[in-house]
Image (cartoon, rainbow, N blue to C red):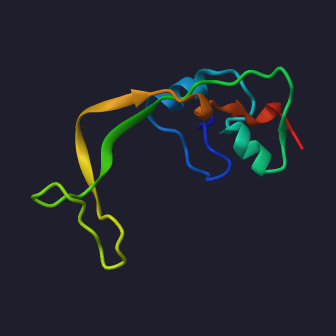
Amino acid sequence: MDKSSKPTTQKRYRGINALYLMSKDYADPRWLTYKQAAGLGAQVRKGEKSTWIQYWKFTDERIKKDDNGRPILNSDGKSVKETVKLERPRVFYARFQRRADSTICRN
């Protein structure tokens, strides 16, 4: 069984997304967004369906603040950001993150 991957980055899907995409009966294991297909000069055929991909977020990026609650600025005057571990991971499905199997594209 081939591993599902992203043709624009050559990265393989992991976890539940890899299992889910491999369970689909497609000859080509590469998956991409509509926007990624357009960026490659391809067009998703009219009427084709896409598949939801699940994303997990374990950290969040926030603006670092001083003891008075004001943003800390770097030497360029921009806010310093810090990565904060979330107490509970967030799972989401974003509409714009839907994937289209690469065999349904034409260029």
Identity of the residue furthest to the left in this view: 67
Question: Residue sitting at 72 percent across and 37 percent down?
Answer: 34
Front position in the image: 28 or 83: 83
Locate residue 71, reporting x and y percent: 25, 60
Q: Is residue 60 left or right of residue 40?
A: left
Which quarter of the figure is the N terminus placed in? Answer: top right
Question: Residue sitting at 68 percent across and 47 percent down?
Answer: 7
Relative to 14, say whether 82 is above or below. Answer: below
Q: Is residue 71 left or right of residue 103?
A: left
**Numbered label tally:** 0
Locate residue 96, reporting x and y percent: 61, 33
Relative to 34, say whether 60 is above or below. Answer: below
Locate residue 42, reporting x and y percent: 84, 44
Which quarter of the figure is the C terminus placed in? Answer: top right
Q: Is residue 99 left or right of residue 78?
A: right
Question: Residue sitting at 30 percent across and 33 percent down?
Answer: 89
Identity of the residue furthest to the right in this view: 107
Image quadrant in which you'd find residue 35: top right
